[in-house]
Amino acid sequence: MRRAGVILLVLAFALMCGHRGPAKPADGPEIHWRDSLNGYLSNDMSVLPAMDAVVDSFMNFWSLRGVSMAVMRKDSLLYARGYGMADASTPMTPGTTLRLASVSKLLTAVGIMRLQEEGKVYMDTPVFGPYGVLNRYDAYIKDANYYLITVEHLLRHQAGFTSRGGDPVFSPYASLDALLRKQLGRTLAYEPGTSQEYSNLGFLLLSLIIEEVSGQPYEQFMQEEVFSPALCRGFSLAGNYLADRHPGETRYYMHADAPLTVSFDGRYAAVEKCYGGNNVRGSMGAGGWTGSAAELCRLVACIDGFGPVEDILWPFSVRQMTTYYDPDTFSLGWNDTKPTGEWTRSGSFSGTQALVKTFPDGECWVFIANTSTWRGSRFAHNIAALFENLRGRFSAQLPVRDLFRE
């Protein structure tokens, strides 16, 4: 486990050797980047008929109503296109925003790394206990193993939480306090750090940690400290019902024969699961964000350790997020990072399927659909296979340009 003192020294060295700000080449003029990407891009800017036909065929096979896809190579946005419909009368465009589901965890991890660089939280910072960031919840704890949980355990899904019996974040609850009172009163499934199990609760707690140490609401901190420096203007926390839909956001659709469900807040006896079945907004950094595929590419460009887009994280933080340990250890924010440079972040939710994937040759592909499939989270494997097909057939045909730049 990294100790705070060592990290302070490394971060101090990084501060002396690095910087963050508007990108510009070391030996050239300042580059002017578009800061209203969603409003600028249109479908007629990205047309590759043979590739688009493959995507259309994939959508038809899986009954997807609408898809947003973007392709970046070495920090240059080459292609961004909407396929199908955002709702009954509106075509999907590159600027349409969609729920990102668990891709939100990548964004939250970036927020934590920003706070680490400011010296406000570290990987070995305790979450609970006398010196814990969230020790105001200690009165709810019955199992002493909770006091062993660190920030890194939450990021790596190693805190001891389990979803057996239902995901606590997406179970009906009256309030956040009621959720934590119930969950922290349970025994952990294993001692923190000795195993791992994917946990939305861990990233909800990371959202609360961001609020506690920054002194700001989670969404405000993310807008000011992550998205604004990355020139990403279109991210926002999702609403739960159709009436809460943001301007420019898609509508969401369930797959055929998906049953109705009781609303998470008890207001309705029968709703589509994508509209009221879960407290999407309340999941915060675990699954609550909306954004476009193009701006996701832009954010990846700001955390990938390459240029010409300058990173919003120091090199030390980028390495922490992307270091590969073994097949059984989650990376920080990413699902998986291979030493070859292939990084993956998937997301699946009622009405949403998303995949962000970078490849060793510097390409990053992003795919977000506004429709569920019966495969649930396993659908990420189908999207990944689509990427491999498209890359093999069309990568060399993608236009050489950068839609990020003026």
Image (spheres, rainbow, N blue to C red):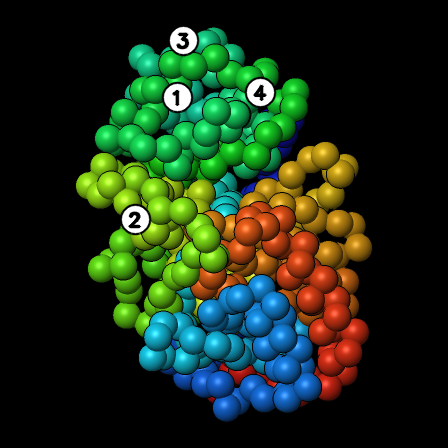
Q: Pick the residue in front: 205 or 319.
A: 205
Q: Quadrant of the N terminus?
A: top right
Above or below, 266 relative to 398 = above
Look at discs 1 and 4 and give the one toward the viewer.
Answer: 1
* Residue at (34% x, 19% y) in the render: 182
Find the distance from the CA under tag 1 to the CA under tag 4: 15 Å
Label of residue 142 in the image: 3
Q: Judge the density around disc 3: few (<14), some (14-19), many (≥20) Cα neighbours within 10 Å.
A: few
Q: Which residue is mark 1?
A: 183
Sequence-first disc among 1 and 3: 3
Above or below, 332 relative to 81 = above
Which quadrant would residue 216 be assigned to in this image?
top left
Find the distance from the CA under tag 3 to the CA under tag 2: 36 Å
Residue sitting farthest toward the front: 257
Q: Amino acid at mark 1?
A: Gln
Q: Amino acid at mark 3?
A: Lys
Q: Amino acid at mark 4?
A: Pro
Q: Which residue is mark 4?
A: 192
Find the distance from the CA under tag 2 to the CA under tag 1: 26 Å
Sequence-first disc among 3 and 4: 3
CB under 8 Å between discs 1 and 4: no
Q: Position of residue 349 (x, y in %)?
A: 47, 50
Above or below, 10 relative to 344 = above
Find the distance from the CA under tag 2 to the CA under tag 4: 37 Å
